[in-house]
Amino acid sequence: DIQMTQSPSSLSASVGDRVTITCQASQDITNYLNWYQQKPGKAPKLLIYDASHLETGVPSRFSGTRSRSGTNFTFTVSTLQPEDIATYFCQQYGNLPLTFGGGTKVEIK
Amino acid sequence: QVQLQESGPGLVKPSQTLSLTCTVSNGSISTGDYHWTWIRQLPGKGLEWLGYIYYSGVTYYNPSLRSRLTISGDRSENQLSLKLNSVTAADSAVYYCARARPRGVLGQWGQGTVVTVSS
């Protein structure tokens, strides 16, 4: 299985801050990497697919990038809003089984 | 906009079979290039992909659960089903169904259903 190492596991930031989350795959997954937002008691919601493509209807303050290696990925919230309080997960689909990162809980400072 | 809704018993006894249904509306499970997926979230923990069924009926399972898991589709009812046998407390989780395009982009999710395994 491909292991997805996500960091940090939690962070606290102020409204308006830039927030960055990273995800490292245990092997090359090219750009088969997605990012999800999960609010308490709700299902995850797709934000970014294929490493850097914004899902329709998702605010442009969310973005994703991939390093040249195909193993390192970054998710960014450019200007944190109160409604962005949630847990964020990365997920790879380069190989089966699909696997997820451990999640990053984002809180407001 | 396709909608998915999980249903099933919230409580299952150890060693029994967990059976869940996912009803799909505003979209057909037998058309389009989609993988109809089951995922679970263990209490306070991360997400685990269980498996999926392609619109053609071909299934793929997580090897960690393959010996206990069956995923099937009922085209007449436009439903997915999940059966997990010989359950233990470790199978207690929120179970989600989702639609994946083309192989692993989980664009639509059900709201999830809580399953507790306990005697």
Image (cartoon, rainbow, N blue to C red):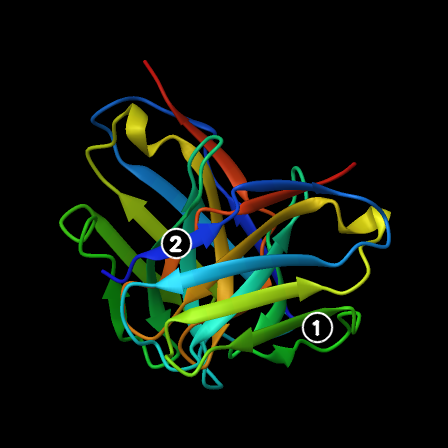
Q: Between A28 and A32, which is closer to the camera in this rendering?
A: A28
Measured as percent of width and height from the top left, residue A94 is found at 33, 75
The image's mark for residue A4 is: none
Measured as percent of width and height from the top left, residue B81 is found at 38, 55
Depicted B4 relative to depicted B69: above or below:
below
Depicted A105 relative to depicted B3: above or below:
above
Q: Is residue B1 left or right of residue B89?
A: right
Residue depicted at x 18% and y 56%: B63
Kind of residue sitting beneath label 2:
Thr
Label 2 SS: strand
Q: Between A57 and A10, which is closer to the camera in this rendering?
A: A10
Q: Is residue B82 left or right of residue A86?
A: left
Is any atom of residue B32 visible in this view?
Answer: yes
In terms of image quadrants, where is residue B55? bottom left
Q: Is residue B21 left or right of residue A20?
A: left
In terms of image quadrants, where is residue B54? bottom left
Instruction: Compute the Cα span from label 1 to label 2.
Output: 33 Å
Kind of residue sitting beneath label 1:
Gln
The residue wearing badge 2 is: A5
Is any atom of residue B75 visible in this view?
Answer: no
